[in-house]
Image (spheres, grey):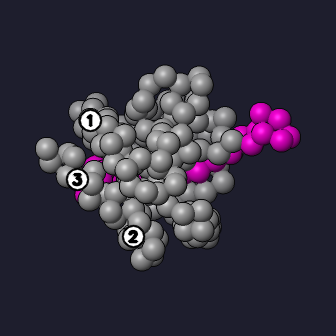
């Protein structure tokens, strides 16, 4: 996704932040208070299904991302998290395992070094297929009920985790990558 489109997508997400439901606010508040985020509405079997889909999408993005021509995916997973969450969220939703929120956050190592990241949250779990771009994460796919690693990030954006909700430009750019992902998964 070009920087202009990514900026536009995150502005749409930011604008929708004030319209979150009371249930969503209650869950976000509960997750902030508890070190382990467990909501019994997701079974271990569903957790494994999400992990399997996340792993296959990650593998497909390793092939499709760099070949897509999109600057944001050329060094996948590095600096690819915003597009990755929108693609993964769409796939999970298409398979009936969603919906998920795309969550963006920032943290600072010092005044001049700010880091941003994006991941999925929903149904009491966090899904992250680009966390290994950070030196303290070795797993290429994180699917967990434990939000402790992601808590370093101050939430700045939250919205629908599906590229098809962000206008024709985002749909056109990421739709080509999504088609490639689906082709890889059908092999």
Of callouts 3 and 1, the N-terminal one: 1
The structure residue drawn at horizontal position 37% and vertical position 40%, both measured from the top left corner, is: 62
Whether residue 146 is in magenta: the answer is: no
Mark 3–mark 1 Cα distance, whole angstroms, equals 14 Å
Residue 113 is left or right of residue 131, and the answer is: right
Residue 149 is left or right of residue 174, and the answer is: right
Q: Which secondary structure, mark 2?
A: helix
Most foreground residue, 148 or 168: 168
Q: Which secondary structure, mark 3?
A: helix
Q: Which secondary structure, mark 1?
A: helix
Of callouts 1 and 2, the N-terminal one: 1
Q: Residues within 10 Å of mark 3 (few under 14, many from 20)?
A: some
Q: Residue furthest bottom?
A: 168
Most foreground residue, 130 or 66: 66
Mark 1–mark 2 Cα distance, whole angstroms, equals 25 Å
| Residue occupied by mark 2 | 171
Residue 138 horizontal/vertical position (percent)? 49, 22
The structure residue drawn at horizontal position 23% and vertical position 33%, both measured from the top left corner, is: 45
| Residue occupied by mark 3 | 182
Q: Do we see residue 187 in this rendering?
A: yes
Residue 114 horizontal/vertical position (percent)? 74, 42
Stretch of the chain drawn in magenta: 91-114
| Residue occupied by mark 1 | 52
Whether residue 95 is in magenta: the answer is: yes
Mark 3–mark 2 Cα distance, whole angstroms, equals 15 Å
């Amino acid at each position: 996704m070009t920087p202009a489109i990514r900026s536009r997508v995150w502005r749409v997400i930011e604008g929708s932040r004030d319209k979150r439901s009371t249930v969503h606010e209650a869950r976000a508040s509960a997750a902030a208070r508890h070190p382990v985020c467990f909501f019994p509405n997701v079974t271990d079997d569903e957790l494994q299904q999400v992990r399997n889909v996340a792993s296959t999408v990650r593998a497909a993005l390793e092939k499709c991302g760099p070949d897509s021509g999109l600057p944001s995916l050329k060094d996948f997973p590095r600096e690819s998290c915003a597009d990755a969450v929108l693609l993964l969220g769409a796939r999970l939703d298409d398979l009936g395992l969603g919906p998920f929120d795309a969550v963006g956050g920032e943290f600072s190592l010092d005044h001049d070094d700010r880091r941003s990241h994006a991941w999925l949250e929903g149904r009491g779990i966090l899904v992250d297929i680009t966390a290994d771009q950070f030196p303290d994460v070795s797993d290429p796919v994180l699917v967990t009920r434990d939000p402790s690693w992601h808590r370093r990030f101050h939430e700045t954006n939250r919205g629908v985790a599906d590229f098809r909700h962000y206008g024709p430009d985002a749909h056109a750019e990421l739709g080509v990558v999504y088609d490639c992902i689906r082709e890889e998964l059908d092999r």
